[in-house]
Amino acid sequence: MSPAVLDRILSKLPRQEDNRLLVGFANKDDAAVFLIAENLALVQTADFFTPIVDDPYLFGQIAAANALSDVYAMGGQPMTALTLVCYPENGDPDVLEQILAGGIEKMMEANCIVVGGHTIRDSDIKFGYSVTGTVNPAQVWSNDGARPGDVLLLTKPLGTGLIATAIRSGKAKSKWVEAATETMCLLNRDAADALKTLERAIHSATDITGFGFMGHAWEMATASRVSLRFNHKRFEFLEGSLECARKGFLAGGLAKNREFIGDCLHFSSKVPDEIQQILFDPQTSGGLLVAVDSNYADAACDLLSEKGCSCMRIGEAIEKTSPLLEVT
């Protein structure tokens, strides 16, 4: 479903009021946060999708890492997960076993316990999880806290949607698939743990998934009432993704993401077309986009590097202006 349609539907739904709901869907954040005690809140999310790689075991791992990512993006620690499975009635049970095995291995890596789930018959395979985590309510990250002067960091390269499209077309090179699979299987846990040590220096955070980099950047800018400015030369892209963009291996959601942003974004004439495409590319298990106090930006990059995580210093938050987003 396109972001525009979903946004229109959600805007018509009644808003339930409860003082214990610290983060709901008002700002289109990554997960909900619900207060259950003075120093304890639940983080809740759900995500599932169709296979994006041919290997069922790796698909299970990617789906798990993707679902867990929303909890990490809120500053939380995953605790339990419920499996969500749609599977053909006559599908190969061995394939389903491999998907489940890959998923549970990644959940074990995250110290998150799979406690059950639900399975239905469907013509297409779909797999993912509903994940519940915990967080101290005083340490919640959300997408509405970016401030003018903040430095914007990104922790994973972009381009998974383009490469997944090339895989479906039978045109992806093996080294592209390996690089994309590696980054999609990588938990955002280490990046989140590194940044948590900076405490209140992290003003805002979100993970980059189906709405593409620019879609999630727009959500942060809108929720925070600031504008975001990016330097296209500071981004890192997965091997093969630029070539995929030039050859037109564009995921179906890319055009919808671009349409949704519309006039809120301005590209400098210096930004190549293929980079513009990648910035709208729907991502799976993408990295964290973080707005950090400029006085702590160097420390944040050092901490991420010590954990073996990427750290791209891609831009800054500025006073709200028009357009809301700019790429130079």
Image (cartoon, helix red, strand yellow):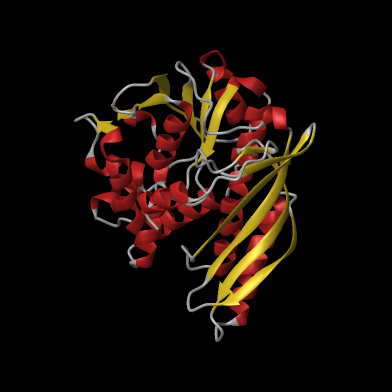
Q: Give x and y (percent) for residue 121.
A: 57, 79
Q: Quadrant of residue 34?
A: top right
Q: Is residue 12 above or below residue 298?
A: below
As displayed, is residue 216 above or below residue 138? below
Quarter of the image for the N terminus: give it.
Answer: bottom left
Residue 40 visible to the viewer: yes
Q: How many marks?
A: 0
Farthest left residue in view:
269
288 over 177 or under it: above or below: above
Q: Residue at x 67, y 67 (%)?
A: 101
In the image: residue 157, left or right of residue 104: left
Residue 71, located in which quarter of the rendered image?
top right
Q: Is residue 278 toward the left or the right of residue 208 in the image?
A: left
- Residue 249: x percent and y percent? 29, 57
Q: What is the x, y in percent for residue 162? A: 36, 54
Residue farthest to the top? 295
Which of the image's four quarters has the C terminus? Answer: top left
Is 100 or 79 nearer to us in this picture?
79
